Amino acid sequence: DGGITQSPKYLFRKEGQNVTLSCEQNLNHDAMYWYRQDPGQGLRLIYYSQIVNDFQKGDIAEGYSVSREKKESFPLTVTSAQKNPTAFYLCASSVTGTSGESSYNEQFFGPGTRLTVL
Amino acid sequence: QKEVEQDPGPLSVPEGAIVSLNCTYSNSAFQYFMWYRQYSRKGPELLMYTYSSGNKEDGRFTAQVDKSSKYISLFIRDSQPSDSATYLCARFGGTSYGKLTFGQGTILTVHP
């Protein structure tokens, strides 16, 4: 089955520790994204990558880092510099295209990782 | 002002009711609009996307865009308890990297 997997489902971290969240996709999508979801705030973009070995900061990149060494994988590291890391983290990949004169982006999401700082 | 505003609810309706979920946006450059459904502790799944003003229908779901008033809506007919979820609206502004901007999400409960 094609899809996006994230692991672990639940993650607990002590203050001062770095942790890495895994995201893998077998959809052959070029673009991948990391979002953070907090209650009442929708999804906020942390980092995105349009192609292997390239990634860009999103709206809330401080305290996070990513790598994109393979098309299928886009791990996110939550560093100790992230002051409020407890949240639900979602990875997505996307198909982009055009319809007439317009472009579109259809993003598919993984099941998420819930990170809690103890 | 947030780029996409959505009433967070919660919204509670009886089974069989027609549900109306709404979002407003502030940037006229927005092109595509999307509705995602998210069950508790799960990732969002794409329900529908639409471009331009007018309606798009898929089974019990209808997406409506009114670009003149910058208003997007999702209607659910004959609502079912399985429709209970958080519904997120999003817009795609056509930028090269495909950024989606999401509303806060509306929590919907359909009770039997």
Image: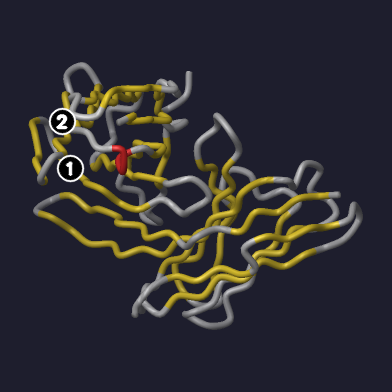
Confirm or deny contact between disc 2 and disc 1 (CB under 8 A): yes
Amino acid found under the numbered disc labelled 1: Thr
Q: What residue does disc 2 label?
A: B64
Tell me the residue at 53%/50% (across/down).
B41
Q: Are marks 2 and 1 on the same chain?
A: yes
Q: Which numbered marker is on residue B110?
A: none
Residue B17 place in picture, x, y as percent: 20, 24
Chain of the residue where label 1 is placed in the rendered structure = B
Describe the element under mark 2 as helix, strand or loop.
strand
How far apart marks 2 and 1 lie (CA) works out to 8 Å
Quarter-of-image position of residue B59: top left
Q: Secondary structure at mark 1?
A: strand
Amino acid type of the residue that numbered disc 2 sits on in the rendered structure: Gln
Query: Which one is in front, B36 or B54?
Result: B36
Image mark count: 2
Label 2 marks a residue whose chain is B
Residue A77 placement: quadrant = bottom right
Give the residue drawn at x 88%, y 56%.
A14
The answer to which quarter of the image holds residue A105 is bottom left
Residue B50: give its label: 1
x and y, in percent, of residue A112 in the image: 55, 58
- Please identify the quadrant where the N terminus of chain A is shown: bottom left
- Mark 1 or mark 2, which is nearer the start of the sequence? 1
Question: Which of these two is toward me, B14 or B27?
Answer: B14
Residue B8: x and y, percent?
Answer: 45, 24
- Most distant residue in the right direction: A16
